Image (cartoon, coloured by chain):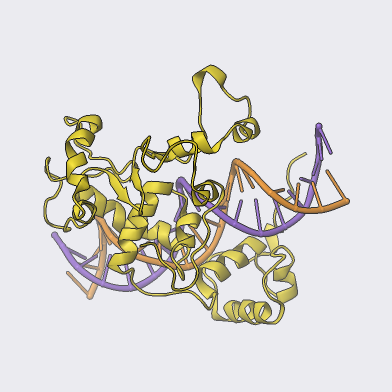
Chain colours: A yellow, B orange, C purple
Amino acid sequence: MGRSPCCEKAHTNKGAWTKEEDEKLISYIRAHGEGCWRSLPKAAGLLRCGKSCRLRWINYLRPDLKRGNFTAEEDELIIKLHGLLGNKWSLIAGRLPGRTDNEIKNYWNTHIKRKLLSRGLDPKTHRPIDVDRPFTALKQQDMSAAQDSTASEKYFSGDEEGGSSSTGRHKGCYLDLDLNLNLDLSISLPCHPSQEQSSPREAKAQATPQSLCCHLGFQTGGTCSCQNIPKSLVLLSHSIRPLEEGQHIA
DNA sequence: AATCCTAGCAACCGCCGGATG
DNA sequence: CCATCCGGCGGTTGCTAGGAT
């Protein structure tokens, strides 16, 4: 059967937006609000695909966007959140008021990736690239360092040119989001080899707070009892609540 | 001055999942 | 339960500006 195209491609403009198009889109959304992107282009007199309008509005025209360079605080927050969430750019963006997922994704690919590499960390896993020093060993050895209240600070404060990629300078892959998280985590649903789910829907149905917390990387005991999951973390598993304006992660 | 290379960013594409009939 | 619609997401592409040669 196949899906109908989201718009009639033959009669739509592509590429960079003109000032006139921007103005049409802005004035239409000001008058009518967001919603029904599919019909918006026609109603607004734009020869654009609805998706394109949505993207343009969200990533560039929205009045609450914060333009300009990322601050050091935003950098660190992105790194932390990426360690926790992976490439869930929209969730990460939800924690950075005024920033868009596209912006963060671009920033990650152009700046932060390199920053992590210069620290000798794998941008995907946030683990040391050094293969001669397995993570497990590192974990044990650096746990004490991590207990130092400034350890996480040190971990994230490697200077760009400092050659921090040399072995022994990593402070371990520990996040400091008020909780004792490590980066051996994934948001993915549990996958027990013995009982493989036949469909994503089934897998979802079997996700429990217990399995969730283990996959989030909580230490047994301590924060994670696997019995008493903080409500906020169950929430986290479903969706990350956007920060209110001015609110921030400690 | 011309050409090449690279980084940065805006925009597109294809897929996924929730909502709806 | 199924088919379809639609919004949203993440990955990727392509254009452009600026620096290097």
Q: Is B5 left, or right, of A105 in this rendering?
A: left
A193 to B14, vertically: above or below: above
Determine which quarter of the picture holds residue A37.
bottom right
Residue A7 x %, y %: 70, 58
Is residue A109 visible in the rendered structure shown here?
Answer: no
- Nearest the viewer among A80 and A212 is A212
A7 to A66, vertically: above or below: above
Residue ID at (30%, 59%): A76
Number of marks present in the image shown? 0
Residue ID at (50%, 37%): A227
Q: Residue furthest top?
A: A194
Q: Which image quadrant: the N terminus of chain A?
A: top right
- Nearest the viewer among A172 and A163 is A172
Residue ID at (74%, 41%): A2
Q: Which image quadrant: the C terminus of chain A?
A: bottom left
Q: Is A235 left, or right, of C16 in this rendering?
A: right
Residue A157 x %, y %: 20, 58
Residue A64 x %, y %: 51, 76
Residue ID at (55%, 76%): A18
A8 to A125, vertically: above or below: below
- Nearest the viewer among A179 and A225 is A225
Residue B17 x %, y %: 64, 44
Is residue A116 visible in the rendered structure shown here?
Answer: yes
